[in-house]
Every structure is written in structure tokens, then in C-alpha cells.
Amino acid sequence: MRRGSRSRTVRPLIRAALESIEPYEGGKPIEEVEREYGLDRVVKLASNEGPFGPFPIARQVLSTQSFELNRYPDGSAYELRALLAERLGVDIDEVAHGAGADGVIGYLSLALLEPGDEVVFGWPSFASYMLDTLKLGATPKPVPLRDNRYDLEAMLAQIGPRTKIVYICNPNNPTGTMNSREELDAYFERVPEHVLTVIDQAYFEYIEEPDYPDAIEEYFKPGKRVATLRSFSKIYGLAGLRVGYAVASKEICAALAKVRPAFDLSSTAQAAAVASLSGDDAEAELERRRSYNRVAIAELGRILRAFGLETVGPAVANFLYLDLGVDSRPFYEQLLAQGVVVRPLHGFGAPTAIRVTAGTAEEHALLRQALQVVRPGGRSITA
Ligand SMILES: Cc1ncc(COP(=O)(O)O)c(C=O)c1O
């Protein structure tokens, strides 16, 4: 046999499904921008993390408790799941943890999707619905938003016999808009039995609108086929530790346990999440953050509008979305050079838009300064 003759029959190592995938690009870290642009003050208004950091009680636990870091964490995250189950009024076996809500989206995809299965979601929306579907060789069915909101009627029309998952991002990242109880009620009247509806409520604790539904109370408990996603990355300020969860049927949670890596949540992540839920001050801290955000989001809107940047709405979480009508990357890069990191949205299906997260008054002042020299075409006024 001639050398090399076998190489012609070697199968490609990498799965064909990955060919069309652009890896998820997160918001740029502050340190990287400081280094690249030689700046000593950079503000990040890019990843909806909020300006607060962990709850004081979680900080205290992280800095004072001695974790046995030579030991593996509890792979079942028992204490955290038990606490969540008690707070939410569900069974512990109806709570499935993950490395962020994003981790849970990955496990849901792995547990449910065969090549050729279909996944319906609104678009532009959270990039993982698209990416995790493609990774498994399943077929994404992105449905255009209507008036920057999820169009549940149009999504129902896209559901077919091979549809396994429908994602409803409520409120939608990146537009910040929500669907009402009435719209979701009407959706659940018509969605076929074979579909799992995943309601992503990563920003749940921020929302104050009376017609915003609590998917666990209003759909899961009455028996709809629904998984609700929540996160500790947003109002709880633990994005760096990666904690999220789903509330879903025991059958779904058991399937997620089969695909989840054995020790997905570090001991520090579990302890910080438990502390955030159980501190005496937890409810008051949530309310403080909500009311701070109420003021901050209004201020952010005023600043952007003062520079002719119209945001879409009503936006109900801690971020605003604006469509520039031209490629948003030059504008994003000019803002970076001024020390302000916002989020261009090419990976979310909105290449002409950016998303800006509400920050502190000082961070907003820096944004205002930057907008005095940068314009949406991407040209700096001083350039
Ligand atoms: C709608 C939505 N779902 C899920 C996530 C992921 O959250 P986590 O940090 O818990 O993975 C995010 C984060 O930006 C989000 O906006």
C-alpha cells in the first residue's frame, strides 16, 4: 500500500453541522479595551450585567467562607435546588440547574434535538437559540419580530410536526420588549401538544409591568408543557460565576441531568446563589435594584434621545435597543475608542443595531461625553 493512500478515505474530524457557525462573541472585557486603546477609564454597558455586583450577603460569603476547593462541588446542586423549589412552590425534581441559563439552553438542545428537528424562535433574539440548534444539526426557524416584539401568532404558524422547541424570550434580548399575559394565554390555547415551549425569563426580577406573566405560576403549575429559564447573572449580579436554572417537568429535568457535565456549578457559584436567595435582606435588595434600574433606564433613554438616537420600546428590563439603519460596527468601534463598550448585534440577527445596558450616573456621564464626539455613521466629529 502506498503511503498516504489511506488519507483519501479519512472522514473529516469536525462535524459538518459546525461549518456554518460563527462562535458567540461576548461583550468586550473592560481590561481588553483599556489595553487596546490605552485608556484608564472604560465603562461597560454591553452585557446587561447591571452595575451592582453580587448581593452584599453573597460578597460576604465569598470573602469569608472557606470553601474546600480541593473537593468537587455537589453535582446535584441540592441546597440551591431545594431552596429554589421552596421559594417557587415546585418540587425539587422540577428544578434543573446549569452554568447560566445559557448552559441550560445547551442541555435542552442536547436532550431534545435530533438532526432535522425544528426550533422556532423570534429573531432578532438571544443568539444561543440559533447557535445551539445549529450545533446539533437541527433546523432553526427564526420568525421576524413585529414592531420589535415576538410575534406569537406568526410563530404558531411556523410550528410543524418536527418542531420540538419554541423559545419565547420574554422580555426579548436584545429589544427589551415583552409579550403580555393575554398574548401568552392565546398562544397556549393553540400550541400543539408535541412542542416544548421554553419561556426565557432571564430578566424576570426587573419587570414591574402588571400584564407581564410569571411563567412558572401561570403556565407551568397549571400543567402547560413549558420550561421556564431564570438566571443569577442579571439582577443578582453573579454573571461571572455562571448560575441559571430551568423549572420544568420531572421528565425534562431528568433528561437535562443526563447531558449536564457532572460538576457544572462550582462550589463558590452554588454558595453565592444560595446566599443571594436566603439573606434576610434579599427582597429589599431586589427592590432597591429594581427601583435604581427604573431611574437609570429612563435616564439612559433621555441621553440617547438627546443625541437623536431613538430606542425601541416599551423596554422593560435593564437595556435599550436602537437601530441605526447602517452597519453598527463603526459606531461601536468609535465608542470603544472613547472608552464606552456597547453591544453590536450582528450575532443576534440585527447588524444595524446596538444594545446599551443601563449603568450608574457616572457611567452615563461618560456615555454622554462619548456621544458628543461620535456619530452613528461611525465618524468621530473630531476626526
Ligand atoms: C434572554 C437571555 N437568556 C439567557 C441569557 C444567559 O444568561 P446566563 O448568564 O444565566 O447564562 C441571557 C444573557 O444575556 C439572556 O439575555
Image: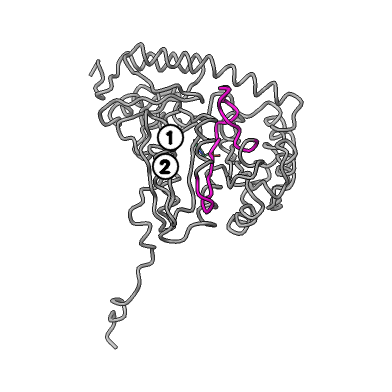
Reading the image, the residue beneath label 1 is: 150
Q: Which quarter of the picture shows residue 29?
A: top left
Q: Mark 1, residues whose alpha carbon is within 10 Å: few (<14), some, or many (≥20)?
A: many
Given residues 95 and 292, the one toward you in this image is: 95
* Image vertical order of residue 2 relative to residue 42, above or below: below
Q: Mark 2, residues whose alpha carbon is within 10 Å: few (<14), some, or many (≥20)?
A: many
Reading the image, the residue beneath label 2 is: 155
Marks 1 and 2 sit apart, C-alpha to C-alpha, by 8 Å
Residue 8 x %, y %: 28, 76
User: What amino acid is labelled 1 in the image?
Assistant: Tyr
* Image vertical order of residue 295 relative to residue 343, above or below: above
- Badge 2 residue CB within 8 Å of ligand 1: no
Q: Residue at x 74, y 33 (%)?
A: 64
What segment is highlighted magenta in the picture?
191-217
Given residues 241 and 287, the one toward you in this image is: 287
Quadrant containing the C terminus in the rendered view: top left
Given residues 69 and 178, the one toward you in this image is: 178
Q: Residue at x 39, y 40 (%)?
A: 154
Q: Residue at x 56, y 27 (%)?
A: 212
**Magenta stretch holds residue 199:** yes
Earlier in the chain: of badge 1 and badge 2, it is 1
Q: Check if mark 1's residue and mark 2's residue have beta carbons within 8 Å.
A: yes
Query: Left or right of 340: which side holds 359?
Result: right
Total marks in image: 2
Of labels 1 and 2, the one closer to you: 2
Q: Residue at x 46, y 13 (%)?
A: 299
Query: Left or right of 2: which side holds 35?
Result: right
